[in-house]
Amino acid sequence: MSIVLVRVDSRLIHGQVLEAWVPHTSARCIVVMSDDLMSSPMEKMIMEASVPSSIKVFIGGVTEMVSRFKSGEFDKLRTLVLFANSQDVLSAYRDGFIFNKLNLGNMHAGSGKVPCSCTIYLDPTDIENLNELVAGGVEVGSRCVPTDTQRSYKKMIPKGGV
Amino acid sequence: MIGLVIVTHGRIAQELLATAQSILGPSKQVYAVGIERSQGPDDIRLQIAEAISAARGDGGCLVLTDLFGGTPTNLCSSFICSGKVEIVSGVNLPMVIKCLGLRASAELLPLAKALKEYGQNNIHIVSEILKPST
């Protein structure tokens, strides 16, 4: 399996991914695992249409895409994997989607979320999810665009906690 | 009249609109939505919905966005509605100025097509036009 980046980005496929991360990682394939996006057909369609034709793109629900990974469908492609939130990452991980590193790109504000950087807002559930991944051996770091320095999410949590 | 909403990264939308209005004078049924790095999709979607419903007139609403494949365009896409809301990406100042001039007497889809063409046709390598006379 050739995974070049696994990223949490609430905007999924957008400018930073297409213009910065795809060239940086030389990805040839983008996989989006999101149950929520499956209920917005227009947004799914425009995300598919925005990817240059030289890059393959596959968008599906978490369970479906994990089983396609397991079947070896993406083994020969340099693949960039996108999730909208930490819960989807953990679901995929528990389903047997194996990866070593997780990039936190954009995790936007919402009720109960505490700002940890200008693009990362976390709540206690996010912390639990990320901690479980770390306990399983996944290296979790925040880096919005390739030119940013990677930071450990644990060091980004404000002193009062979330 | 057709309403106009500009949706972009950063403050491009506000500045395009302010600049166009400084050239043409103030106009009604126009809204600018600039999205910041820290904003999440739900928050942005709500802002877009409010701007479209405020701008919208009898003729519907034209949405101009910056980058095809970027979040502003992606999130606006769910508002597309035949005859009511159309989106043209790749917005530039000539398109905004033209839109403000044409929209009172145009229909939505023909206006979108005209602006696409106008925006593209207004990109020049200026030296190729300014050939010095010898």
Image (tube, coloured by chain):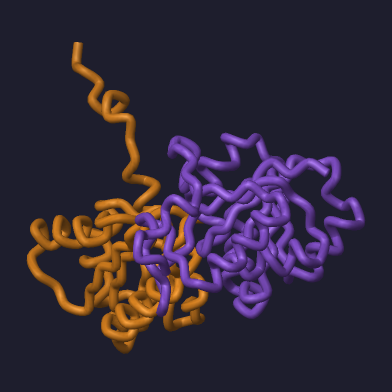
Residue farthest toward the bottom in the current orientation of the protein = B58
So how many labels did they put on this image?
0
Residue farthest toward the top in the current orientation of the protein = B134
Q: Position of residue A23 (x, y in %)?
A: 58, 36
Residue A107 against residue B4 in the figure, above or below: above
Screen quadrant of the N terminus of chain B: bottom left
The residue nearer to you, when weighing B118 against A107, is: A107
The residue nearer to you, when weighing A42 against B39, is: B39
Q: In the visual, does A27 lie left or right of A42?
A: right
Image quadrant of residue A66?
bottom right
Q: Position of residue A87 (x, y in %)?
A: 63, 70
Report the chain shown in purple: A
Residue B46 against residue A11 in the figure, above or below: below
Q: Position of residue A122 (x, y in %)?
A: 46, 66
The residue nearer to you, when weighing B106 against B2, is: B2
Image quadrant of residue A13?
bottom right
Q: In the visual, does B36 lie left or right of A39?
A: left
Determine the residue positioned at 51% across, 62% down.
A11
Screen quadrant of the C terminus of chain B: top left
Q: In the visual, does B98 lie left or right of A105?
A: left
Determine the residue positioned at 59% across, 65% down.
A86
Determine the residue positioned at 37% across, 46% down.
B121
Viewer can see residue A45: yes
Residue farthest toward the right in the current orientation of the protein = A71
Determine the residue positioned at 25% across, 57% down.
B11
Q: In the visual, does B112 lie left or right of B1?
A: right
The residue nearer to you, when weighing A97 against B125, is: A97
Image quadrant of residue A22?
top right
Q: Position of residue A41 (x, y in %)?
A: 63, 75
Figure colour of chain B? orange
Viewer can see residue B107: no
